[in-house]
Image (cartoon, rainbow, N blue to C red):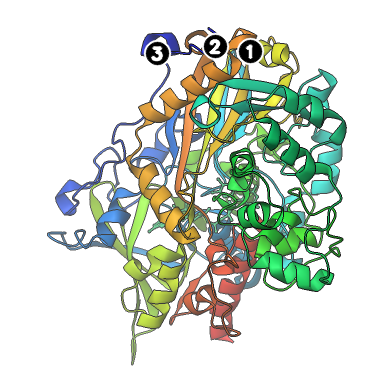
Amino acid sequence: MTEENRRELTDAELGMGRSIPRRDFLNGAAMTIGSALLPGKLQAGKTGADEAQTHSGYNPPVSTGLRGSHPGSFEIAHSLRDGTFWKGAAAPEQLTEKYDLIIVGGGISGLAAAHFYRERAGKSAKILILENHDDFGGHAKRNEFHFGGKLQLLNGGTMLIDSPTAYSAEAAGLMQKLGIDPVALNKKCSDPGLYSSLGLGTGVFFDQETFGTDRLVAGLAAGEEENSGGAVASAKLEAFLTRTPLSEVVRRDILRIEQAQIDYLPGLTSAEKKDRLSRISYREFLLDIAKVDPALIAFYQTRTNGEWGVGIDAEPALDCWAIGLPGFQGLQLETGSAPHMSYSAAGYANGGSARFHFPDGNASIARLLVRLLIPSAVPGNSVEDVVTAPVHFERLDADVSPVRIRLNSTVVRVRNVGNGNVTPAVEVTYVSGKQLFSLRASACVLACWNMTIPYLCPDLPEKQKDALHYLVKVPLVYASVGLRNWTAFQKLGISNIHAPGAYWNSASLNWSVNIGDYHSPRSPEEAILLHMSRAPCKPGLPAREQHRAGRMELLVTPFELFERKIRDQLSRTLAAGGFDAARDIEAITVNRWPHGYGYEYNPLFDPEWPAGQAPHIVGRKRFGRIAIANSDSGATAYTDVAMDQAYRAIDELLSLNS
Ligand SMILES: Cc1cc2nc3c(=O)[nH]c(=O)nc-3n(C[C@H](O)[C@H](O)[C@H](O)COP(=O)(O)OP(=O)(O)OC[C@H]3O[C@@H](n4cnc5c(N)ncnc54)[C@H](O)[C@@H]3O)c2cc1C
């Protein structure tokens, strides 16, 4: 098939009918939920414990189809938001279980909160973690595949240890306790040179809808990571551009933006330039200051999608300079952060943290935390063996254990109770299976998404609820696609693909990491996982509006559409390498994150609040015996921040007793 006469591929040609496991039984449809209509798949036992997690073979990471915020995990929370949950709900059954601490949310922040509490209150402290998903870890989710008996892993969410700032003493201390030394692990286990040693590098897929023709152009740069963002190596660029479908004038402008040493803001000091760049988008910088041809924008539009979930229309030029986008090399900007930058950009401008990618991303950190809290649930004793260690889900909620993790349990109400002669406590109400349960603890940490807290705690002051509502999480989708082999990639000379105009923004062969008994594929004949990502943003709107619109898009997108878009895009990109979607795709897991990255203030759209008045600070204020953690409370989306916020929340609660 030539580029000029491309026709839509049929479902059969794409392999849509092929039997791969699909799991989309609820399809994200909005449900009207009263007590009689809670999702019936999961069962709660008489004690409120989730029975599903005790069944033999329960192992959510191997599920394919729709993961991330999977069907069954969010419908109750949505009915609470819509005001329909309590209509006709039966009275909760009071459980006699007693806890020192109940934690809402089993992500890194909730798990870290349990650890910090035990460190100070003692190992016998009784802690219950309630989590609405079928797995622990929150965004740090593991996708697990077995091809021909060989284990292959990918991150379903949190990709790697990597933060704009060095880990704090508390977060670094916890990492050390878990045995994680990112620098040493990276040196020992990462194999970043595998693909380039095979002659594979970065390619760009120009799609017909955006660029007038479908064309994959390889040879942009050697490298293995998606969204590397940086300026393109000069030697290869000219040759690359001549093969693209871009016009002569756009090619010339790209060369200028990538390579020319031009000061587009003459006469200003570095500080003045930085200030100016912090107040305009990168798109405006390119169009109005660097005066590029408007058709060039499509080439760079999605370069910031992976970092911030929106394109260059909604990201400050200065932030784009900090993550290495081109055009600034002649401006002589002094290194380091400046006022009026986002948290991420300012941090990366100052150097960032150490980096390491576990094969399942930071899900390994979640597993190590669970091992620390409930040793029998994750056997083993090293940071390397955790990658292949089985998780005994049935041991997570055992009554013999001081720490219990109850999955598939959505908390719907949290309130301070007790005064006068009654000891102050917190009453927590949650749904498991079709039933409502209530129980009490001395204190509670809400390590869940901050914007859900006003619905869980309607008694909060209005000002605090408004602040919590301000934080709009960033929607994202990560797909893990199992491929029979990667010979097409080898023939085409690519290991990762930017697709600036297409549905999926990028596609990358899995990171090559060898750790413990886990070994990444080395031969193109072997099966492999492909990581694809999409930020469902709506260019032109303010950032938070883009996030809201993208979230709605994700909630109504069925698995079949994600699947078709994967098959179609890979076919169009890789056909010249002999790729056949119907034959070569073995499995698909789509990790849908309508509530993804914690909201990070965007200097283009958010005001500069007076000290202490930023919404995340107002929103995270302790309320009686209820403290608030989660990376949202740090107004950004990083693993270390989730740990830091857990530490702060526990400190607030324990200082009540001192
Ligand atoms: C796609 C993606 C990629 C990322 N990549 C990186 C990366 O490479 N490096 C990095 O450092 N950070 C990354 N992050 C950010 C990082 O994952 C988060 O900052 C961190 O894991 C958040 O942990 P948390 O515990 O605060 O929140 P979460 O992981 O969101 O955990 C909170 C949990 O609470 C649950 N919950 C919510 N409401 C309720 C309720 N009512 N009842 C019970 N449970 C509830 C949620 O479902 C969730 O499981 C990424 C995030 C995403 C979405």
Residue situated in front as seen by the camera: 422 or 588: 588
Tell me the quarter of the image containing the C terminus: bottom right
Q: Position of residue 295 (x, y in %)?
A: 60, 40
User: Which residue is rendered at x = 68% and y = 51% of the image?
Assistant: 291
Label 2 vs 1, first from the N-terminus? 1
From what the image shows, is residue 409 above or below residue 340? above
Q: Amino acid at mark 1?
A: Asn
- Residue drawn 72% across the image and 66% down it: 170
Q: Looking at the image, is mark 2 or mark 3 nearer the viewer?
A: 2
Q: Nearer the viewer, residue 141 or 317?
A: 317
The residue at the far bottom in this view is 420
Label 1 beta carbon within 8 A of ligand 1 = no
Identify the residue at horizontal 18%, vertical 50% (top origin): 32
- The percent position of residue 275, horizontal first and vertical second, equals 72, 71
Q: CA distance from mark 2 to mark 1?
A: 7 Å
Question: Image height check: is 274 above or below 489?
Answer: below
168 or 29, which is in the foreground? 29
Whether pointer 2 and pointer 1 mark residues with C-beta atoms closer than 8 Å, the reply is yes
Residue count near mark 3 (Cα–Cα under 10 Å), binned few <14, some 14–19, many ≥20: few
What label sits on residue 188 in the rendered view? none
Q: Considering only order in the chain, which callout, 3 or 1, is on the residue closer to the N terminus?
A: 3
Q: Earlier in the sequence, mark 2 or mark 3?
A: 3
Which kind of residue does numbered mark 3 sit on? Answer: Ser
What residue did someone put label 3 on?
19
Q: Which residue is mark 1?
A: 485
- Residue 509 visible in the shown view: no
- Tag 2 and tag 3, C-beta contact below 8 Å: no
Residue 584: give its label.
2
Q: Secondary structure at mark 2?
A: helix
Q: Amino acid at mark 2?
A: Asp
Q: Is residue 118 left or right of residue 492?
A: left
Helix, strand or loop status at disc 3? loop
